[in-house]
Image (spheres, rainbow, N blue to C red):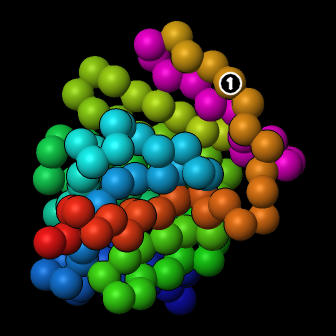
Amino acid sequence: MENEVIRFSNRINESISILKKGPILIWGDLHGKPFYGIYKIKSSSTCENRLILNFDNETKVIIKNPVGCTLYTGYINVRDADYVRLENKQYFKEHKKFGKIIFYKSNLGFKRLILINKSLLAFEIYPDSFANT
C-alpha cells in the first residue's frame, strides 16, 4: 500500500504543468531575499519516508516524514515534518523539529531557534503575486 509520501510525490509529478512558482517558506522562515527567491518545482521523488523536491535552479528540498501534504490551486504545502533541508550547490539550510521548537542551522554557520506557531507550515511555496504574473 502506498503511503502519503509516495502518493503526494506522484501527484506533484502529475501536476508539474500547473504548479506555480514562488518563494519557499520553511516553518515561516523565508528562503532568499523577498522578490528574488522564486522557485518552480521540476520534479518530485521519494527515498524511504522522505519527499524530495527538485527545483529549476539547482535547489533541492528534502522533507522527512511529511504529514498533511496539500496541493491546491497550483501551490504546495506540508503541515508538519521531522525536518526540512534545503540544498543549493554547496549551500544547505536545515530545520529540525524538537517538540514545539525548530532548530535551524546552515553550513554558513547560522544557528537559531524558532518557536512553532500552529499557523506555521513545515514547508510551503508561498503564493507570490509578483512571481506568477
Q: Is residue 128 above or below residue 60?
A: below
Point 18% across, 41% down: residue: 58
Q: Is residue 105 left or right of residue 73?
A: right
Q: Is residue 108 above or below residue 121?
A: above
Point 13% across, 81% down: residue: 17
Point 62% across, 31% down: residue: 104
How packed is label 1: few (under 14 Cα within 10 Å), some, or many (20 or more)? few
Q: Is residue 88 above or below residue 108?
A: below
Q: Give how far across and how far down residue 124 sits, in percent.
A: 47, 63
Point 33% across, 65% down: residue: 128
SS class, disc 1: strand
Q: Give how far across and how far down residue 33 sits, in percent.
A: 34, 37
Determine which residue is flagged by label 1: 112
Magenta-colored span: 97-108
- 79 or 36: which is nearer to us? 36
Q: Is residue 99 left or right of residue 69?
A: right
Instruction: Tell whether position 8 is magenta.
Output: no
Instruction: Tell whether position 98 is magenta.
Output: yes
Q: Give how far across and how far down residue 102 sits, in percent.
A: 72, 40
Main secondary structure of the magenta stretch: strand
Q: Is residue 58 visible?
A: yes
In the rendered picture of this protein, how many numbered marks are placed on residues? 1
Q: Is residue 61 left or right of residue 113?
A: left
Q: Quadrant of the C terminus?
A: bottom left
- 7 or 60: which is nearer to us? 60
Q: Is residue 77 above or below residue 94?
A: below
Q: Give how far across and how far down residue 45 sits, in percent.
A: 32, 64
What's the amino acid at mark 1? Answer: Arg
Q: Is residue 65 visible?
A: no
